[in-house]
Image (cartoon, coloured by chain):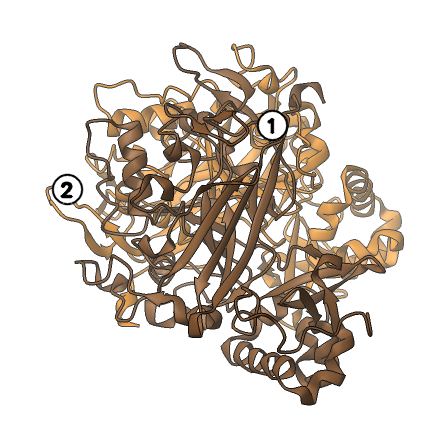
Chain colours: A orange, B brown
Amino acid sequence: MAGTHAAGWLAVPPDHPLGLQTLPYGTFTTVDRPTEPRAGVAIGDCVLDLSAAMCRLLTGRAHLFSSGRLDAFLDAGDRAWDQIRSAVTKWLSSDDYREAIEDLLVPAADARMHMPFAVADYTDFYASEHHARNVGRIFRPGGEPLPRNWRHQPIGYHGRSATVVLSGTPVRRPYGPSLPPGTEAPVFAPSARLDFEAELGFVVGVETVVGEPVTVGRFTEHVFGACLVNDWSARDIQAWESMPLGPFLGKSFATTISPWVVPLAALEHARIRPPSHGTDVFSYLAEPDGWGLDIGFQVTLNGHVISRPPYATMHWSPAQMLAHLTVNGASVRTGDLYASGTVSGPQPGERGCLLELTWGGTQPLALPDGSTRTWLEDRDELVITATAAGPEGTRVGLGEARGMILPAQDPTAI
Amino acid sequence: MAGTHAAGWLAVPPDHPLGLQTLPYGTFTTVDRPTEPRAGVAIGDCVLDLSAAMCRLLTGRAHLFSSGRLDAFLDAGDRAWDQIRSAVTKWLSSDDYREAIEDLLVPAADARMHMPFAVADYTDFYASEHHARNVGRIFRPGGEPLPRNWRHQPIGYHGRSATVVLSGTPVRRPYGPSLPPGTEAPVFAPSARLDFEAELGFVVGVETVVGEPVTVGRFTEHVFGACLVNDWSARDIQAWESMPLGPFLGKSFATTISPWVVPLAALEHARIRPPSHGTDVFSYLAEPDGWGLDIGFQVTLNGHVISRPPYATMHWSPAQMLAHLTVNGASVRTGDLYASGTVSGPQPGERGCLLELTWGGTQPLALPDGSTRTWLEDRDELVITATAAGPEGTRVGLGEARGMILPAQDPTAI
């Protein structure tokens, strides 16, 4: 790539979401080296070949990126994370390093992204009060919308890590059993209520041993960063199967993540006190400072913005989620991914899934092409993007989680 | 070990559960080579060092056991599984191989067992109708005991794979939030209703890709074998947290598996038609032959037998469970573990957990030492064993899943 790219240095526009304030990590290949995954750092409209840069400029840590995946780096811990972020910042901002680095910048358009780490356990929470209340109102009209336990602890469940896929992977409409409205017996059919859920995911770097809880104060010692998550949901399959053990086939067919893992260090300026701050919670959930996050989400369906969920309204913080997950002695591992649950704000245009946006399918969304949606249709493309508040008025980009729905294929005919 | 063991060959008593009819696989070390995990096959009261035997007698497949763990072997598929089982059977039954093999037999008492494979996704089902009905009667007296969906499909959920531990690992009583009877607000405390669940687990060898369902007829192409599972459960934590997303902290602190994986080939004689056979099920769950299994479980508490659950009464077969798990397009991976759910028969002495044995804690169990139990107490040791029907009147041993309860440690004081 030598000489083909000269606009990287300090020339990234200040309003670019992938400036020096962001510097997220991912795994990429290029068309000329398709079988060599390399670790990369996004900067402006380029990707820095971090695997190669480390071999030139920080050889003592180069082994952390030799596989091209981030697993060893995640496992290396917060001192290594800080050291490498500082080094990359220096390389990309000081002219002294331009010569050593410039030929390692690849145009982002030429980089094919891959899963950046192996997902160990995948867990999903339910941390938005607006989402939980809306779901309660839709499914239990007239009843108390929030489950009794909801304000006492972050509610979560385990999901399927095998089917966490990278942004851009098409998602096939699942078959499964469900009980269509007005019928007496369940049917086995393609989901007729396919939905997305816009979420934020947190990536664990440093593992624990069984019996070692991660207190809210030790959150940053174990969690490396964040990515976007689309927790695709087949509402009809989910509704029929979930009693008494929770979601299963209605969720396990696919979960999409964004390709860039944004370090917590890049989200420091976005920190706010979450709504749970100061409320009466168990001591293991009390959070003196708070890891609420001022992140603005945007959801587009076929290119049209259908929602702008504000992460700042999430009741439980990711530090509280992890403290809860481990308070019973459960351990975490490098590559664990835990997601926030659907991000929904108080306004109708801030809801993070079609279940809420169309109020259970009763209020169709109008799209600019004249069509309407209650649930996702075949060939619909759903894109989640987000930016966080950064230093000096900048925005920290979290990339995108993109997926197109493919028509169902009858599994009994294969 | 040369010369210290001469009684192995064909001298295994015919009623020994680990005779030639069984030949399960595991991972072990010895005190003289504590850092070298080796794959082993249990035979009588010995363990054959399979990693070494392969290097001598079947070098073309020896790489499958070079790590000492079973992962590569599991991934190798049913032709390799059959070939190696045939070879080991020949080595251990023909005098022609005695000289080549004898020094590779280690007394089982000298073998320290280790986790035999890396658990990918862990899933747990709810396949016993007796268990599901008893749970329904205990929690919803007067109501319909079975959930509406139960007879239409195997109900399951995802659990935490990080905390699947080997038999013998002590299990610490978890802390967590719960709502004690008669209280208005939840408390954060050690579980006061700690329970076991006797289950059978199935180990996936050959992975699939997303969108490729494993039909009931292809069960044996993907599943290698079975082990015993104790799905430890904190009933009070579970009851409070489970609505609406299912069990979380009440299960995730520990799941114990037995160290020996018994190949499906050793369970062929135990095959029976499960109770679901011939009932009106979705076509993807119809099972012409059936993988019900005639396996007798035994549960001992501090050495006293408290239950003998019959696996033959399980409604859904493991082939049906896997067909369900994948029918929505979800993929499986090498090392996936899915468990049956609590094994309970129709009789009171056949119930596979204390929740049922003590009827929700209302009918204490009397132990020979004069004490009683409603739930597990600190220092209680729970052991699950099982044998399956084998050829010619033999029994196929499934080893044991053993665990002792350690007192709770306050996670907020660490």
Q: Secondary structure at mark 2?
A: loop
A99 left or right of B400 in image: right
Residue under circle 2? Answer: A181
Amino acid tagged 2: Pro
Count of all numbered marks drawn on residues in the image: 2
Quadrant occupied by the C terminus of chain B: top right
Can residue B95 be seen from the camera position used here?
A: yes
- What residue is shown at x 63% (from left), y 86% (from top)? B94
Amino acid tagged 1: Asp
Q: Gap in Å between the C-alphas at discs 2 and 1?
A: 49 Å
Image location of residue A231, percent across then percent down: 43, 44
Image location of residue A150, percent across then percent down: 42, 22
- What residue is shown at x 82% (from left), y 74% (from top)? B3
Q: Which mark is residue A102?
A: none
Can residue A305 be seen from the camera position used here?
A: no
Q: Residue furthest bottom?
A: B96
Residue under circle 1? Answer: B378
A214 left or right of B317 in image: right
Image location of residue B193, percent across then percent down: 48, 26
A392 to A371, vertically: above or below:
above
- What residue is shown at x 19% (from left), y 63% (from top)? B278
Q: Nearer the viewer, residue B125 or A400?
A: B125
User: Would you identify the image quadrant in which residue A266 lies?
Assistant: top right
The answer to the question of whether label 2 and label 1 lie on touching residues, with beta carbons closer than 8 A, is no
Q: Nearer the viewer, residue B260 or A214?
A: B260
Tell me the chain of label 1: B
A329 to B182, vertically: above or below:
below
